[in-house]
Amino acid sequence: MQASYLGVEIGGTKLQIVLGDEKGVIHERARFNVDLEQGAEGIRRRIAGHWEEIRRIQHPAAIGVGFGGPVDWQSGRICCSHHVQGWSEFPLGEWLHGLTGLPVAVDNDANVAALGEAAHGVGLRRDPLFYVTLGSGVGGGLVARQSIYHGAVPGESEIGHVRLDRSGATIESRCSGWAVDRKIRQLKKTQPNCLLAKLVGSKEGGEARHLGQALGERDVLAEGILSETADDLAFGLSHVVHLFHPALIVIGGGLALLGEPLRLAVAQALPRFIMEAFRPGPEVVLAALREDSVPVGALALAALESTKAKA
């Protein structure tokens, strides 16, 4: 009988709990919105409650967790969350093991997404692979020889915090979904009759989701936002190229759902920023697993942890 694994994605806005196999196939999924007022305790209650349902029908071999923030991957202790209160120094791996009795591996969500794409997504037979996620924040992960690269505790590959200039501007402050939201809100003030302003309407928050439609209609202002965002991202990724020279750069996260326009803009901008010997640079692709990069990666992490536990 094929072993099953439990994958958990803990982010700033969503919690996903999936059951799947070592091939990265998700068989069952539960998705919950994160209640910021209830914080980390509310998320833990959700996990504990759902585990009671799972244990009646399934017996997973191990658990893998992708957590949205810096993690001590060796102990499973959370450093902090930049979005949800109550996670600082919490022993998540120990807590989950106590709850379930199963082997548990916890890592940063971007690291886990990189593993998912390397093992079961667009990165098959492409090594090394660097993954950048463009969501509410910006994160990164590097996989080489099917293993996540780890620096000193509590983290590594934090591309979102790479500075773009000496004023302190970061990739996250310029290229995250929230950054694009801000650009569109500013555009509404200066160009209230533009297409993006009309698409957004009076609602505030999540403005970036309208960018794709505006690009599809070849709106010049939308194209300007895309070009600026892609240029900043490519400049930041040039540092990754010079340090690690990955064979593949994978763009994932919610903003990556813009698809080919974003990928092409980054791919065309990147060679301008890298040394001549490295040009044209790594291939830039979109995440094949799309929004499942983290949960599929969590299944891969669980499978590796199960193998370690048996050794």
Image (tube, rainbow, N blue to C red):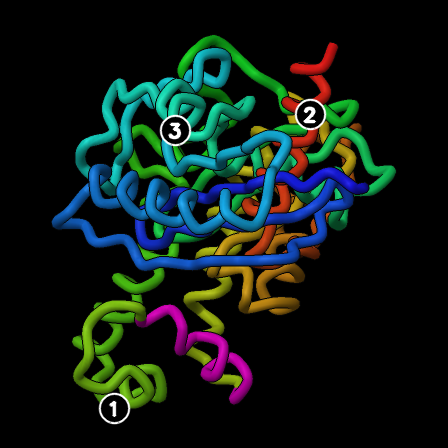
Location of residue 287 in the rendering, given as x and y in whole percent from the top left corner: 65, 53
Callout 1: few (<14), some (14-19), or many (20+) C-alpha neighbours within 10 Å? few
Gap in Å between the C-alphas at discs 3 and 1? 55 Å
Does the magenta run of residues contain 67?
A: no
Residue depicted at 42% across the width and 16% down the height: 72
Location of residue 126 in the rendering, given as x and y in whole percent from the top left corner: 82, 37
Q: Is residue 22 visible?
A: yes
**Mark on residue 99?**
3
Residue type at the position of mark 2 = Leu
Location of residue 169 in the rendering, given as x and y in whole percent from the top left corner: 31, 38
Q: Nearer the viewer, residue 10 or 155?
A: 10
Prevailing secondary structure class for the magenta stretch in the rendered image: helix
Q: Secondary structure at mark 1?
A: loop
**Mark on residue 56?**
none
Callout 2: few (<14), some (14-19), or many (20+) C-alpha neighbours within 10 Å? some
**Mark on residue 193?**
1
